[in-house]
Image (cartoon, rainbow, N blue to C red):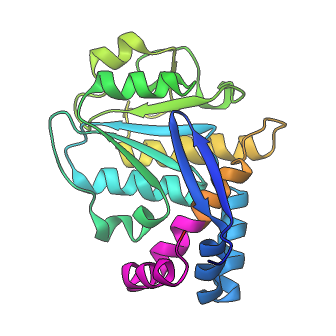
Amino acid sequence: MPDITIIVIFAGNRNKMIDLDYLAFLENILTENRKERFLHVLENRTKHFTVAVEDVFQMHNTSAVMRSCEVFGIQELNVIEQRFGKRIDKEIALGAQKWVDINRFDSVSGCLSDLKNKGYQIIATTPHENDSVLEDFDISKPSALFFGTEKEGLSKEIMDNADGFLKIPMVGFTESLNISVSAAIIIQSLTNRLRRSNVKWQLSEDEILEKRLLWAKNSIKDIKRIEARYYEENPR
């Protein structure tokens, strides 16, 4: 039986086994440019900030937020679907769902509990509180940035459980922006400041390995057949 190199990743209460030989096998199928692109993108990915959207009725807005997360390097998006159970609009996301991790919750309380257990402070984005304007926000703490529905904003449950509030400074007559626009502005501003800071914001080596494996699998057609053949020829 051939030797197979396994690395175990401890993620919260979950153990994930990464077969390094299988990873090497899959990456050998990819072009050198593709592999180098993965490494470059992963160098700029972070879980220091995460984004959460609550019951967004317009599906394309959730998809647009996902695109902003992907473009500006946020690895995880949390979607609360307590009232409107809609799937991500793949056309608007333009493939971002392959590169961003989506955590789905059917209740606000479940999402809040999960993020707090992971060590995030809950930050509610709203134009109606004065805790912090965007340029003054403290980026040193791991933060979950919550965005609310188009008409109603964030629910009372989230507002009551927030550790802080964040708003975009505006000087016009309009007092709020579309959720996808707000998310893009805030994510771009905070991640740009984060990368220029001394905060340790990068993914861990184990998290990078996990993403390399997932992204390689997402990039290869007929991956199930290839995976089955590999493990048939290389039994554990």
- Which residue ends up furthest to the front in the rendered image? 1
Above or below, 129 relative to 147: above
Q: Image point 52% across, 58% down: which residue?
A: 70
User: In the rendered view, would you say 37 is above or below 102?
Assistant: below
Quadrant of the frame with the C terminus: bottom right
Q: Nearer the viewer, residue 232 or 86?
A: 232
Say left or right for 119 vs 158: right
Q: Residue at x 49, y 74 (%)?
A: 217
- Find the magenta span and give its range: 213-235
Spot occupied by residue 126 in the image (x, y as percentages of width and height) = 42, 25
Q: Main secondary structure of the magenta part?
A: helix
- Say if residue 200 shows up in the picture: yes
Q: State the image coordinates of residue 42 (x, y, percent, origin top left).
A: 67, 61
Residue at image point 60% right, 41% down: 10
Q: Nearer the viewer, residue 178 or 143?
A: 143
Q: Is residue 215 above or below residue 171?
A: below
Q: Is residue 1 left or right of residue 218?
A: right
Measuring from the top left, give residue 100's x and y in whole percent. 48, 57
Residue 162 magenta: no
Task: Left or right? Give the position of 231 relative to 224.
Answer: right
Is 225 part of what is drawn in magenta? yes
Q: Residue furthest top?
A: 160
Q: Quadrant of the N terminus?
A: bottom right
Question: Can residue 45 be spotted in the picture?
Answer: no
Residue 210: image quadrant is bottom right
